Amino acid sequence: MGQVKTFEDLECWKKGTLLRREIGELIKTYPSHEKFELVSQMRRASRSITHNIAEGYGRYHYQENAQFCRISRGSAYEILDQLIVSLDENYISNEKYEALKSLTADCIKILNGYINYLIKAKAN
C-alpha cells in the first residue's frame, strides 16, 4: 500500500467514487416513476460506498475501519442487485449492465483487499 495521508488516497475510495459517478449519470436516464424507488435506492447505495470508507478511515482503529468497509462492500453488492433489476426492467442495455457489473466487481475486489490489510494490521 502506498503513502496514504487521507481517505482520498485509498484505491477503494477512488474506485468507489468512479462507480458513484457512473451510477449518478445512469439514473438520470431512468423513468420518472422510479425517482423515489429504484433511483433513490441506487443513489443512496452508491454514495454509501464512499461515505462508509471515509467514515471508517476517520475512526483510526483497524477493527472499526474494517467494519465500515464491510458496510461499504454490502452497498456495492446492493448496487449489483439494482443493476440486475435495471436490466430486467429494460432500463439499461446488456452492454451497460456488463460494464457496470465489472466496475462494481473491481470495487468489491479492492475493498476486500483493503479489509484484509486492515485485519492483518490489527493482528500485528
Image (cartoon, rainbow, N blue to C red):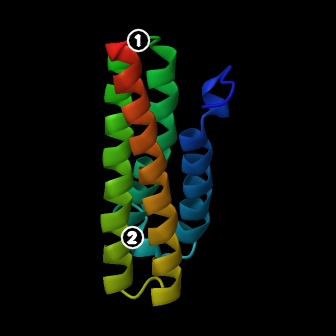
| Mark 2 surroundings within 10 Å by alpha-carbon count, few (fewer than 14), some (14 through 19), many (20 or more) | few
Drawn side of residue 118 relative to residue 14, left or right: left
Q: Residue at x 65, y 24 (%)?
A: 4
Position of residue 70 measured from the top left corner of the image (x, y, whole percent): 32, 37
Position of residue 33 measured from the top left corner of the image (x, y, whole percent): 39, 73
Provide the residue designation for mark 2.
Answer: 34
Q: Is residue 28 above or below residue 55?
A: below
- How far apart are the two marked residues, 1 and 2, measured between alpha carbons? 39 Å
Q: Residue at x 31, y 85 (%)?
A: 88
Provide the residue designation for mark 1.
Answer: 61
Drawn side of residue 8 relative to residue 27, left or right: right
Which is in the foreground here, disc 1 or disc 2? 1
Q: Quadrant of residue 19?
A: bottom right
Position of residue 112 measured from the top left corner of the image (x, y, whole percent): 39, 43
Which quadrant is home to the N terminus?
Answer: top right
Of labels 1 and 2, earlier in sequence is 2
Residue 89 or residue 34, whichever sits in front: 89
Given the current orientation, which residue lies at the most extreme front position?
124
- In this figure, what is the number of numbered marks? 2
- Asked whether residue 93 is in view, the answer is no
- Asked whether residue 75 is in view, the answer is yes
Tell me the SS state at disc 1: loop
Residue 114 or residue 34, whichever sits in front: 114
Q: Is residue 44 above or below residue 102?
A: above
Which amino acid type is marked by label 1?
Answer: His
Which amino acid type is marked by label 2?
Answer: Glu
Q: Is residue 14 above or below residue 24?
A: above
Q: Residue at x 48, y 53 (%)?
A: 107
